[in-house]
Image: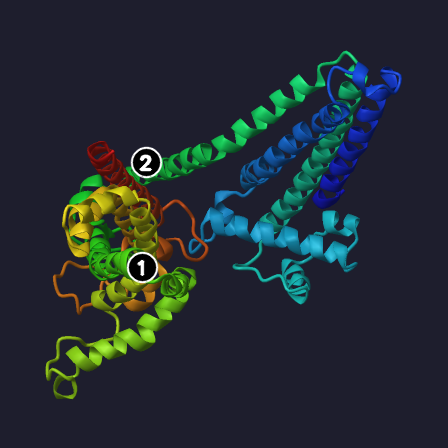
């Protein structure tokens, strides 16, 4: 049974359980709902949730765990001599999955019967040709070991799917039967349902925490593997980023960290003054109809995809900066400081434009939250409007404004597409904002692009870069929390 149909089956049984549980409760009370301990709907929900929740939880866990278990089981079938020198076990397993998928497609389209797919031992070249006709491309020469592993992969997957269907169906029907048998007029259905819903709410609230823990642990384990293969002193204290996949790479984070912080700093130099001044104008000076028009128009910037900003940097801002700072006598300044459209300044300016709504919108809401009585008291003492804004409103709103700025900083540090298209891909130390540089996020994408096998430091370094970036943004959040708490006590 396909997984989608299995979900439909579980939902249908749960709906039937709701109706049956409600009806059984009323029948046990002689049709008088006043004789029931709980409202009739609680009895229906008790049966429905007993059939629905355990089965869906098991289904979700099974779908996540089965691919990993199958891959671990099948990868042991491939001998070391079956792995070409130019390939890795991960790439061979990619071919195993593609062959297995190709056999599935062939069976579904009638090109092969299920018996033929299991017993095929034809020439491997013929197998490649037949799968190629079905649109299945293979990355390397398919050997007989790969074909056997693919058949075993299909067999284990099919067996696991059958067991999953049986277990989920049994849990669904068993839960329905158990809850239905307990249903009577004296059963405390409301208490059971409310405890069950509370458990689901706790689980939902825990998902963010569990996801964060899972992300950190996954990066941490791979980072440990990286430092087993590469010196941590070179990573944290080296001065060169030069991966070459030949075992003699120099993988220092410092040039990438410098580029990340430099570009983010320029972006904040653009975003913070413009965004903060826009927030002050909209909240303190603008008329209602101007604010109603200008604020949504400003917030449109936050909805533009970052790839569009990248194109804007590459095609508009970069060439404009070259016309000012580059091409010798052809430039407006008559200098030759900028040789190409990609530079730190290009990416920083465009990223700053992207960050303006993050600063302006949040700062505007925070400034508006300052009590009007503070403004009236300042004006009543003879202060002008500008003095009130500088000495009363902005200090009172400072914690929230700092939080908005640090949120924008975190967004700038994690940006990728604008850097790829606007700043270039050169990792180096330089104070010149007209030169090309790169950032941590760009290198993470580069190191994990394509068919990768997590067995070389050049690939595993992406996880070390990721966890370093995580620690950096976490530090920004802790700093923001400290500042907010300090000034909140002062102005509350």
Element assignment for label 1? helix
Q: Residues within 10 Å of mark 1 (few under 14, many from 20)?
A: many
Task: Identify the residue at horizontal 29%, vertical 49% (top origin).
Answer: 367
The picture places residue 460, in percent across and down from the top left corner, at 35, 45
Residue nearest the viewer, comparing 410 with 75: 410
The residue that label 2 is drawn on is: 224
Q: Quadrant of the C terminus?
A: top left
Task: Identify the residue at horizontal 66%, vertical 41% (top origin).
Answer: 157
Q: How many marks?
A: 2
Left or right of 77: which side holds 221? left
Please tell me whether residue 166 is drawn above or below residue 118 in the rendered image. Answer: above
Q: What is the distance, in whole Å, between disc 2 and disc 1 at their CAs? A: 50 Å
Element assignment for label 2? helix
The picture places residue 223, in percent across and down from the top left corner, at 33, 39
Task: Identify the residue at horizontal 53%, vertical 33% (top origin).
Answer: 204
**Residue 340 appears in which quarter of the rendering?**
bottom left
Please tell me whether residue 131 is drawn above or below residue 69 in the rendered image. Answer: below
Please tell me whether residue 107 is drawn above or below residue 311 in the rendered image. Answer: above
Earlier-in-chain disc, 2 versus 1: 2
Which mark's residue is nearer the viewer, 2 or 1? 1
Residue nearest the viewer, comparing 203 with 254: 203
Left or right of 55: which side holds 374? left
The residue that label 1 is drawn on is: 282
Residue nearest the viewer, comparing 112 with 362: 362
The picture places residue 219, in percent across and down from the top left corner, at 37, 39
Residue nearest the viewer, comparing 312 with 234: 312
The picture places residue 20, in percent across and down from the top left corner, at 83, 27
């Amino acid at each position: 049974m396909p997984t989608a149909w299995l979900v439909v089956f579980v939902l249908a049984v749960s709906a039937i359980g709701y109706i049956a549980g409600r009806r059984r409760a009323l029948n046990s009370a002689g049709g008088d709902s006043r004789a029931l301990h709980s409202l009739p709907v609680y009895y229906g929900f008790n049966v429905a949730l007993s059939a629905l929740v355990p089965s869906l939880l098991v289904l979700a866990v099974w779908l996540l765990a089965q691919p990993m278990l199958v891959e671990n089981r099948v990868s042991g079938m491939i001998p070391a001599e079956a792995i070409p020198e130019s390939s890795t076990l991960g790439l061979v397993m990619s071919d195993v999955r593609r062959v297995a998928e190709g056999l599935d497609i062939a069976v579904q389209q009638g090109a092969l019967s299920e018996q033929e797919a299991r017993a095929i031992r034809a020439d491997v070249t013929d197998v490649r040709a037949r799968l190629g006709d079905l649109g299945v491309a293979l990355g390397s020469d398919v050997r007989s070991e790969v074909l056997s592993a693919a058949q075993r992969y299909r067999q284990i997957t099919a067996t696991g799917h059958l067991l999953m269907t049986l277990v989920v169906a049994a849990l669904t029907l068993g839960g329905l039967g158990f809850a239905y048998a307990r249903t009577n007029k004296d059963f405390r259905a409301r208490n059971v349902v409310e405890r069950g819903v509370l458990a689901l709410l706790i689980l939902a609230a825990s998902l963010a925490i569990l996801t964060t823990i899972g992300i950190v642990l996954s990066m941490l384990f791979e980072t440990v593997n990286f430092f087993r293969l590469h010196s941590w002193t070179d990573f944290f204290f080296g001065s060169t980023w030069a991966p070459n996949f030949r075992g003699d790479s120099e993988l220092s984070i410092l040039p990438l960290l410098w580029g990340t912080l430099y570009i983010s700093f320029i972006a904040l130099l653009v975003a913070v003054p413009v965004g903060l001044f826009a927030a002050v104008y909209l909240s303190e000076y603008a008329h209602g109809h101007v604010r109603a028009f200008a604020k949504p128009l400003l917030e449109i910037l936050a909805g533009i995809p970052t790839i569009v900003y990248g194109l804007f940097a590459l095609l508009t801002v970069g060439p404009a900066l070259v016309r000012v700072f580059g091409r010798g006598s052809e430039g407006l300044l008559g200098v030759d400081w900028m040789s190409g459209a990609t530079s730190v300044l290009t990416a920083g300016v465009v990223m700053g434009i992207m960050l303006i709504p993050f600063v302006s919108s949040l700062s505007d809401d925070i400034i508006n939250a300052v009590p009007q009585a503070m403004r009236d008291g300042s004006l009543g003492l003879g202060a002008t409007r500008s003095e009130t804004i500088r000495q009363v409103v902005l200090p009172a709103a400072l914690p929230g404004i700092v939080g908005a700025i640090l949120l924008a900083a975190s967004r700038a540090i994690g940006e990728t597409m604008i850097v790829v298209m606007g700043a270039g891909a050169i990792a180096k130390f330089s104070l010149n904002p007209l030169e090309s540089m790169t950032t941590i996020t760009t290198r993470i994408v580069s190191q994990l692009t394509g068919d990768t096998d997590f067995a070389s430091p050049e690939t595993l370094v992406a996880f070390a870069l990721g966890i370093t970036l995580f620690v950096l943004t976490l530090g920004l959040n802790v700093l923001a929390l400290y500042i907010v708490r300090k000034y909140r006590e002062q102005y509350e």
